[in-house]
Image (cartoon, grey):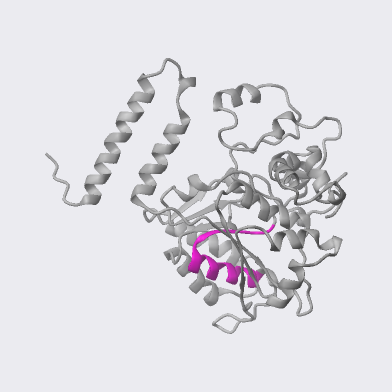
Amino acid sequence: MVAYRSPTMRAAAVIACLMIIVLLTISFGHGTAESVDLARVKWLGSLSSSFIRPMIPNNVHITYLKKEPTSIIHFGFDSFLSLYSAYYHMKGVRLFLHTDYSPEEIFQAQNSLNRTDKWTTLALNMPNLEIHYVVAPNRTTNNVEISLVQHKSDFVRMDAIKQYGGTYMDTDVYVLRDFTPLRAAGFQNVVGREPIWGHVNNGIWMSQPNTTMVNVFIQASHEFFDGGWNTVSSIMFRRIAERLHRYPFEVLILDERAWFPTNWQGESVDKLFEPFLDSGASPAATTDVGPDDVDPYQWWRLALKPKKDNEMDFSGSYAIHSFVHHHPDVKNFDGLTPEYVLARQSNFARALYAPVRHAFEAGLFSADDFDIE
């Protein structure tokens, strides 16, 4: 007979037995596969992992740094929607804005009455938002100049993740569903591959506070940053993740569909944003885009039906990294506005319809604001 010498081992054994009993009940207590209670399976999986290892904090971090000393803070509808999609889907989330704009500049933007500042005002007054002032780094500890604001952001996000833990997101990332299953997976870090070259993209990064990966990445970034566009943020980030993922529960690397189902090349951006024009609004898009909206068997039946070549399936994705700023000349696309999303005439619009509709029905904006980018 096996002797369990610690409470943790005994608890793990109990959890394992419960899992076997429940799975057997699910498997043999129902007549068909379609009657499997997916909610119970999901609950059991999250219980077993979170019982042993803590969940990644339900925090979302974004950075907004000055490009020039005289820069004025401005959120377009695209950036507002990025933040609001996280607020909408990730219930109870703490939102962190890390910025080098002064408290006076933030206060002025929060209280602006200028119509063109609509989304800035809404973003900076969003519920659960905490604004943290930071000093953007100008040099590494090796005295290498950090000139581009994108690279400054790389260093700021590392410090934020190290201190607070949670999820870092670029402001062109849009949340499609709750990240709780990933937070509860039991890993110290969760990262994702992108479609091109298999890089691990740091545009989304989930982490516990003060992990081995974040500490190694901070040290390596200061030591090896050379001003190159991809040296640290892409190449080194991938290499560190790939080397640490062999250690138990340190890094989970998701495939591209999870966070980066599209890429920055023109064809992909066109497919995401170009309006269909010859089709009406999608009835299915009137509901939330969530993992339980349609059971997998029904989804498969729908998938077998004829559809347009340019329709995209995000049922296996937690987020979209839009990359629209890399390719702004999309045919028949005049910019990201509430009107564009509410019309549901593109893959992007159908995927993000739910949070935009929610914001509209909550009275955050009116039909008079439909055209403001």
Q: Is residue 164 highlighted in magenta?
A: yes
Looking at the image, residue 20 sits to the left or right of residue 165; the answer is: left
Residue in the picture at 65% in, 23% down:
302
User: Which quarter of the figure has residue 136?
Assistant: bottom right
Residue in the picture at 13% in, 45% down:
3
Find residue 265 and report its horizontal and vertical position in percent.
74, 50
- Residue extending farthest to the bottom is 143
Find residue 151 and report its horizontal and vertical position in percent.
65, 70
Find residue 153 and report its horizontal and vertical position in percent.
63, 69
User: Which quarter of the figure has residue 211?
Assistant: bottom left
Compared to residue 373, the image places residue 40 above or below, namely: above
Q: Is residue 146 highlighted in magenta?
A: no
Q: Quadrant of the C terminus?
A: bottom right
Q: Which residues are magenta?
A: 151-171
Residue in the picture at 30% in, 35% down:
18
Number of marks in the rendered image: 0
Compared to residue 136, the image places residue 256 above or below, namely: above
Looking at the image, residue 181 sits to the left or right of residue 136; the answer is: left
Visible in this render: residue 195? no
Q: Nearer the viewer, residue 344 or 275?
A: 344
Residue in the picture at 54% in, 62% down:
237
